[in-house]
Image: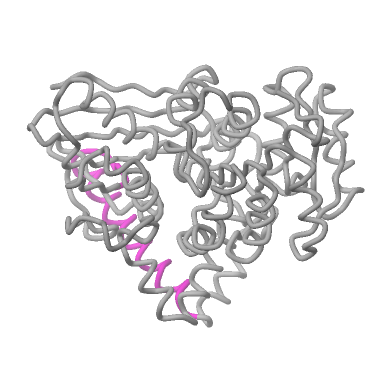
Amino acid sequence: MADPARTHDLVVYGATGFVGRLLAGYLAGAAPAGLRVALAGRSRDRLAQVRGELPAAARDWPLVEADSTDEASLAALAASTRVLATTVGPYLRYGLPVVEACARAGTHYADLTGEVLFVRRAIDRTDAVARDTGARIVHACGYDSIPSDLSALLLAEQARADGAGGLRDVQLVATARGGFSGGTVDSARAQFEEMGRDAAARRLAGDPYALSPDRDAEPDTRQPRDAGPPSRTPDGRWTAPFVMAPFNTRVVRRSNALQDWAYGRGLRYGEVMGCGRGLPGAVTASAVTAGLAGLAAAMSLPPTRALLDRVLPDPGTGPGEQTRARGWFRSVVDATTESGRRYRATVAGQGDPGYAATAVMLGETALALALDGDRLPGRTGSLTPATALGPVLVERLRAAGHTYEVEGSR
């Protein structure tokens, strides 16, 4: 519903970036007629170029100049819209002024961050303010971390409906095909640089409850490790560490805590990458494990990080259209409840998970915030996809072609 006090219903901030252009393109096809959408960024000329490449439905979208280093421009941007979706990263470097401006203005906010340090700082600075102004601040609205967050929610809801008790042991096995962009690399670089400078940041990144709303209230439940040697699932699939697990797992645990541990006080939640079966699966799992360990070591040291910068993609670049179209993702999430009953959730979709599919996820998140306010959970403040949007977002993503299924008790 339009707010006459605000010029726009939805603004895409960072529309000239790689993912910002994809998001704008998705919204040009998915936003209903009459929704007042605008594009925002530092350069009006570049925004006009992006708008000119979009479908006809977007040709009249307004353009708004705003810069993350200009507090006044961000305040004006946030005050002009009911919802702001931002793709401007690394969020640790550029994101805090944006989320603070939205919290102060009472503007609903969504981003694509996969950065634990940024989300922790954003929670500390904006949660109380946003609760006072009525803003929903929703982090991690792409492949980081919607499949993880919503699958855990659906599993807990099904177990509760069956009277099976809370979730106890939950493991997500992710498989996917896609590329990666310079923005993703830059976000990882920003986190490693911060951890290299600050011992407290390193400790926070290693805390399984780093995003908890009340760390002291968390149960003393030993959580699965985010990294380790290759292993096998009970049905024989080889697995390796999942690069997104150190972030996604914290988001799921925050969702549990924000709902008064509705998933279970003893929830143990972990994520791994599926690598196949037999000898090929074992070889792949070993190679992935070694590669991730080497990459983490290289990103941790300034000299080797500088060498990587010469070969990794630059910010603003990413996989081509063909790679994005051929990509896909599938997450299988097995859960055991406190009563011993077993459930399985499957989340899947077409398109490169970090880009084509992520544009769908963030786009539908933004549309839900703009259009479905009366159906959303009655929470404000610093939230997660599951706690801010829950079943409404599941419904939207299913309608957009993604799979969200939960099998009955097994």
Name the residue located 28 percent from the left edge and 51 percent from the top edge: 240
Say which quadrant the N terminus sits in: top right
**Nearer to me, 172 or 325:** 172
> In the image, is 41 to the left or to the right of 339?
right
Relative height, residue 312 to residue 8 (above, below): below
Q: Position of residue 325 (x, y in %)?
A: 58, 30
Colour convention:
one colour
Q: Position of residue 305 (x, y in %)?
A: 53, 75
Magenta-drawn stretch, dominant element (helix, strand or loop): helix
> In the image, is 58 to the left or to the right of 93?
right
> In the image, is 44 to the left or to the right of 172?
right
Q: Position of residue 211 (x, y in %)?
A: 39, 57
Is 249 one of the magenta-colored residues? no
Relative height, residue 292 to residue 9 (above, below): below
Is 280 one of the magenta-colored residues? yes
> In the image, is 273 to the left or to the right of 336?
right
Name the residue located 57 percent from the left edge and 33 percent from the top edge: 365
**Nearer to me, 83 or 23:** 83
Q: Position of residue 51 (x, y in %)?
A: 84, 36
Name the residue located 79 percent from the left edge and 19 percent from the top edge: 34
Say which quadrant the C terminus sits in: top left
Furthest residue to the right?
Answer: 45
**Corner quadrant of residue 37:** top right
Range of residues picked out in magenta: 272-301
Furthest residue to the front?
Answer: 132
Relative height, residue 159 to residue 119 (above, below): above
